[in-house]
């Protein structure tokens, strides 16, 4: 239960920090942080939580991460479903808090609410194929770094920083394509509040990250198994 509570709080923070920066700070007239600032915000949520709850739950914050670690032989299958449920619920809670903040401004609308999308809902107008390839590859690289940074032979205490910087880089690359998911819990939380097109396109932001995570888990396990 402690692990699940940690995952709930951690995923809440990821959504509130990352999507909150996009909704509240990115477009601010004089102090807007832009895409780069949003990318950094997502990375910082992971870095801060890695050191806050990494020793409790492993700080997955993402169903794709849990699935990739399971495929890589680093995570128990019996914990997979409870972790995913906790992550999705934490993401929804984070989005709920963000909704209350955003709608607290007179005349405010939530717009796309930092939801993930393709086609006309892609920030750069990228189509479904581009979105699918982007999410598979970015999640693959994310899990590849996670599996390497947390390996028993990797430098100690640096995993959180490496993983957070990787997520920042991923956002710098892919925000224009899909608004960056690589995390089904993050995508689900925002889509529930937007509804309509966001729920209609949500399938891609579950399928693609899971495919990328499974591939990374299999390949990294082959390259450097935790136990010879």
Image: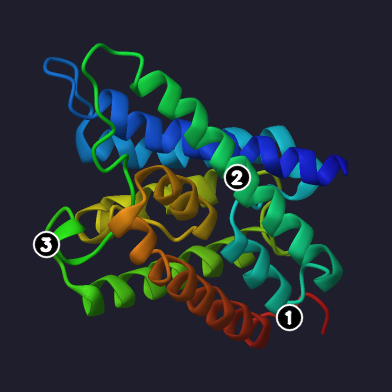
Q: Upstream in the sequence, badge 1 or badge 2?
A: 2
Q: Which residue is mark 2?
A: 160
State the scheme by which the image is colored. rainbow
Q: Toward which corner of the image does residue 6 lie, by quadrant? A: top right
On the picture, is 14 further left or further right than 108?
A: right
Q: Secondary structure at mark 1?
A: loop
Q: Cα distance, mark 1 to mark 3?
A: 40 Å
Q: Is residue 220 above or below residue 53?
A: below
Q: Nearer the viewer, residue 161 or 82?
A: 82
Local crowd size for mark 2, using a 10 Å CA cut-off: few (<14), some (14–19), many (≥20): many
On the picture, is 16 further left or further right than 201?
A: right
* Disc nearest the viewer among 1 and 3: 3
Q: Secondary structure at mark 3?
A: loop
Q: Residue at x 35, y 65 (%)?
A: 200
| Mark seen at residue 46 | none
Q: Upstream in the sequence, badge 2 or badge 3?
A: 3
Q: Secondary structure at mark 2?
A: helix
Q: Nearer the viewer, residue 170 or 149?
A: 170
Total count of labels: 3
Q: Which residue is mark 3?
A: 125
Q: Is residue 196 above or below residue 130?
A: above
Residue 17: give x, y in percent of width and height.
Answer: 46, 31
Q: Toward which corner of the image does residue 75 lie, by quadrant? A: bottom right
Q: Which residue is mark 1?
A: 225
Quadrant for the N terminus, please.
top right
């Amino acid at each position: 239960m402690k692990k699940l509570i940690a995952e709930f709080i951690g995923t809440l923070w990821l959504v509130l920090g990352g999507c909150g920066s996009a909704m509240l700070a990115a477009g601010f007239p004089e102090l807007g942080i832009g895409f780069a600032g949003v990318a950094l915000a997502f990375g910082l949520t992971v870095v801060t939580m890695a050191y806050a709850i990494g020793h409790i739950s492993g700080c997955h914050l993402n169903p794709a991460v849990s699935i990739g670690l399971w495929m890589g032989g680093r995570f128990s299958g019996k914990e997979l479903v409870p972790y995913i449920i906790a992550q999705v619920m934490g993401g929804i809670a984070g989005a709920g808090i963000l909704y209350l903040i955003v709608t607290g401004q007179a005349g405010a609308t939530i717009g796309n609410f930092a939801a993930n999308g393709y086609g006309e809902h892609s920030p750069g107008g990228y189509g479904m194929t581009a979105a699918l390839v982007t999410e598979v590859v970015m999640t693959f690289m994310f899990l590849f770094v996670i599996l390497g940074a947390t390996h028993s032979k990797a430098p100690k205490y640096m995993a959180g920083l490496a993983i957070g910087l990787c997520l920042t880089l991923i956002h710098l690359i892919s925000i224009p394509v899909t608004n960056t998911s690589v995390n089904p819990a993050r995508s689900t939380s925002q889509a529930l509040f937007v509804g309509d097109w966001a729920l209609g396109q949500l399938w891609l932001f579950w399928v693609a990250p899971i495919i990328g995570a499974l591939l990374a888990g299999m390949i990294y396990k082959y390259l450097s198994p935790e136990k010879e």
